[in-house]
Amino acid sequence: MNPAPSVILFTVFSGFGFGFLAFLGLGLVQPAGWAAFALWGIGYAAAVGGLIASTAHLGNPQRALRAFTQWRTSWLSREGWAAVTTLFLLAPVALSDWLGLGWPRQIGWAGAVMCAVTVFTTSMIYTQLRTVPRWNHPVTPALFLGFAATGGAVMAGEPRVAVVFCVILLVVLIAAFRIGDRRFAEVGATLGTATGLGAIGSVTVFEQAHTAGNYLMREMIFVVGRKHAERLRVLALLFSTLVPAALLVLGPGRLWVVGLAVASHLLGALAARWLFFAEAEHVVGLYYGKR
Amino acid sequence: MTQLPASTDKKLGLVVDLDTCVGCQACVTACKGWNDQGYGVPLSDQDPYGADPSGTFLNRVHSYAVQPAEGAAQTVTFPRSCLHCEDAPCVTVCPTGASYKRSEDGIVLVNEDACIGCGLCAWACPYGARELDLAAGVMKKCTLCVDRIYNENLPEEDREPACVRTCPTGARHFGDFADPQSKVSRLSAERGGYALMPEMGTKPVNRYLPPRKKDRPQEASLLAPLLDIKATGFAGWLDRILGKI
């Protein structure tokens, strides 16, 4: 699949934003005054910024509000509802922290649950696609939730919590790579089943259907850059989990250390998300003899 | 509404005969020609006369080489378009309700006025049936020529999809698969029509007919009995004498 920058930024930053908002909502980080304004602001900016980035790849973004109508069947629509609900639900908690109003914390807990729901709905946009076997597996929601929670934990800056989530993410990310690598073969779609000609013998492409590229090939058949996949996987693992965990353990309580850890985590998350798209193979590639 | 109908009154679709298709691309051209000026926005091209031409098509014809375990390989030309699936994943993923399946005849359509061009439906389709029009930013797909098949302004013989109407070898057939006695249902049953990528769980309506079994070259010549000439009389005597020398 084409790793479009808009979709990578959307999933990474909205995931990170909702992850951190969940920590703020739960009260695991309880800032007051202008510190609260800044931290809640970062959470909201990341979540909303990510959502806005997602509209960049739309052909007709002026109709984006229509995406709220089909929540009965569409995970994309559900994601819109979950995101907006969460952002509204947490607003009074943010206000209370900023102005020291002391409003009940329970709304924050509900907001934190909704943060998880939102990230889950985002992940389901990809998980639901049977056409992309690498994504069509429960490990995808686990991966998205893992990134959101770890991002929030690193941003919260409490070393012990962050280390736990970094270790969880490390395990989930390795599992996602391993499971993903065998998914296409597991599903069993081949050029033989795609054309039905497999019943006669082995099928190969004799001649392409068109001499130049088309939307399908640009969008769904992305073969550039896979040769560096192994190295990128290691870098993604290091920067998103081990480096931030080590930084927070070695220099607890310092603001610049937290900033560095967050930067490292986001860099790793961007690399991992780039791989998530670039390594995903769509079955339509079979018709072109490419994956 | 992106909820799929529980059942449709008709199941309109195509039978594509891979035995008679010669890969002439006439269906591709006829499809583009009709749908460029009919239903919805035109099918735009980008850089059509330049170095990297690209365009929106609703039908593509591939060609494949098939090598059986024994015998010679064969070339199969393979038209690919929307299969109007019963469990169409392209419909249910649509966030805006632009994508829908008609309960009366099962045709899967896009309401272009509601399409935001997110492309998720194209991702959900295993068959590459949907292409985003880069000029209009909306999703295009086969409409089964919905503006032809019910069009009473056209002569009756033209009330079928443009690809079917134009096919010079009769490799494409249009009809109702819900009726077991329809031409397409019987054709599919007789010739072992099959669905593409059943493992994707989409329940396609369209059926493909496999290439017929090919004749093998005869090992012995049909003329063999005539070639085995037994000479008689003088010629026979000469034959024997010469054979002994």
Image (tube, grey):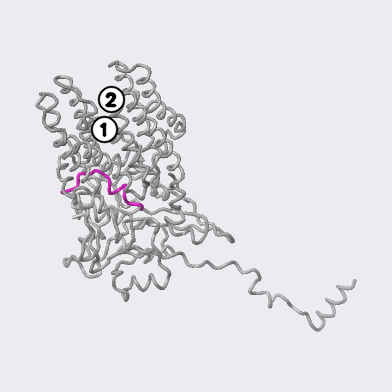
Q: Position of residue A262 (x, y in %)?
A: 31, 23
Q: Earlier in the sequence, mark 1 or mark 2?
A: 1
Q: Quadrant of the C terminus of chain B?
A: bottom right
By secondary structure, the bulk of the magenta-drawn segment is best described as loop
1 and 2 marks in contact (CB < 8 Å): yes
* Relative to A92, residue B178 above or below: below
Q: Secondary structure at mark 2?
A: helix
- For residue A53: magenta? no
- For residue B114: magenta? yes
Q: Secondary structure at mark 1?
A: helix
- Which residue in the structure is indicated by mark 2? A155
- Which residue in the structure is indicated by mark 1? A19
Q: Amino acid at mark 2?
A: Met
The magenta-colored residue range is B113-126
In percent of the image, x 16 and y 22: which residue is there? A32
**Front-most of residues A258 and B5:** A258
